Image (cartoon, grey):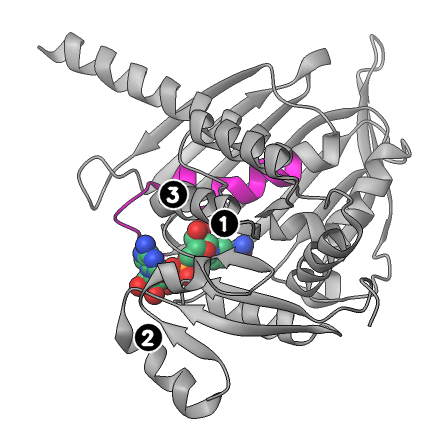
Amino acid sequence: MDTKTKELRFAVIGWGYWGPKIARNLESLPHASVTMIADLDERRLTGISLQQPWIKTTTELEDVFRSNVDAVVIATPVRTHYRLAKEALLHGKHVLVEKPLTASVEEAEDLVAISRQQNLILMVGHTFEYSPAVNELRKLIQSGDLGKIYSIETERVNLGLFRNDINVIWDLAPHDVSILLYLLGKTPEQVRVQAHAHLQPHIHDVAHLDLEFDDGMNAHIHVSWLHPCKIRRVTIIGDARMAVYDDTNPAEMLKIYNKGADVHADPGVSYRFGESIIPHIDWIEPLRLECEDFANSIRTGLLPRAHGGVGLQVVKVLAAVQEKLDMQEKDDATLVA
Ligand SMILES: NC(=O)c1ccc[n+]([C@@H]2O[C@H](COP(=O)([O-])OP(=O)(O)OC[C@H]3O[C@@H](n4cnc5c(N)ncnc54)[C@H](O)[C@@H]3O)[C@@H](O)[C@H]2O)c1
């Protein structure tokens, strides 16, 4: 078997909500198999030994690092990402870490540096960068079809899932920030934030982020664990056309509107109400494409789309937002005192 078709062995650390979904997609790839699953909580692992007795399960992470797996996927709480990813890289394993890459910029920089020194693939689970709809939208923006982009609004809201180790900004906004950076190919120059901690002290469950890009373009991100409806929407306002990407609507995931307005001195504003188009999108599960990219990168040594450097850029934006929020809350406390 040559290196291109060599059977790749994966371990998954973290067998909660997301870990099994990644394992299912890795298992569906040719010449790849999940041979180990680890979780600190033994109860999570009991079902696996019954259904897939050939997969080794363990609560000892050292077993994973010292095993013969080629790569490790880390699907554990965010604050554990850095320690586990570093350990895996130092043991010579390629690593896919769930989003966000780490809980701080320093940690993300360190992982990127270690992966380079070790000549190993470091990838982050920015699943939406692999969504066929997001890629179609990216083509529309980059080809100029939507014209000059004035603004982008994203909404990612639902009831829960509440986390108690990180706030909603670090939990949900990594998706929106990664989508924006991927669509635009640039990072924001300024950030602003408004956030509220309604249910748990100091753990913000609703947040509004404003990102200012060069040439006056701005993006607004609304993330919430406290909302009656599940909304996963990105709205792009261009001067030629507008587009809505609705991840919860498979029949109309992407819709392009030939709508706009022009302001003239006389006779005032003219509106354009043209046709709407729903482009056909060949759908493949984004997580499958993400896993495929990880496996291909391991085989070829080429950087995956969502490589560690991309994860670092997103963590930089999240950290800048968190810093703004911390400063605002300190100022508010001083005013009240
Ligand atoms: N890409 C996506 O769309 C997406 C979706 C959901 C979650 N995620 C990410 O996946 C990760 C896990 O989220 P989840 O919803 O599955 O959480 P979860 O709480 O359901 O599962 C986490 C699991 O990790 C285990 N665990 C905790 N600390 C551990 C450690 N040190 N070593 C080994 N196991 C440990 C827990 O026992 C638990 O089983 C998070 O980083 C989250 O942001 C990504």
CB of residue at label 2: within 8 Å of ligand 1? yes
Label 3: element kind: helix
Q: Position of residue 202 (x, y in %)?
A: 21, 35
> In which quadrant will I find the C terminus?
top left
Circle 3 residues within 10 Å: few <14, some 14–19, many ≥20 = few
- Identified at 84% across, 13% down, the residue is 264
Q: Nearer the viewer, residue 219 or 307?
A: 307
Callout in the foreground (2, 1): 1
Q: Nearer the viewer, residue 327 or 287?
A: 287
Q: Position of residue 124 (x, y in %)?
A: 58, 46
Residue linked to disc 3: 83
Q: Nearer the viewer, residue 189 or 192?
A: 189
Q: Is residue 183 left or right of residue 159?
A: right
Callout in the foreground (1, 3): 1
Question: Is 292 placed above or below 83 here?
Answer: below
> Label 1 is placed on what type of residue?
His
> Is residue 178 located in the magenta-colored stretch of the structure?
yes
Q: Please report contact status of discs 3 and 2: CB closer than 8 Å, yes or no.
A: no
Of callouts 1 and 3, the N-terminal one: 3
Residue linked to disc 1: 91
Q: Which residues are magenta?
A: 160-180
Q: Which mark is residue 101?
A: none
Residue linked to disc 2: 44
Question: Is 37 placed above or below 233 here?
Answer: below
Question: Is 322 placed above or below 303 here?
Answer: above
Distance Cα–Cα, label 1 vs label 3: 12 Å
Distance Cα–Cα, label 3 vs label 2: 21 Å
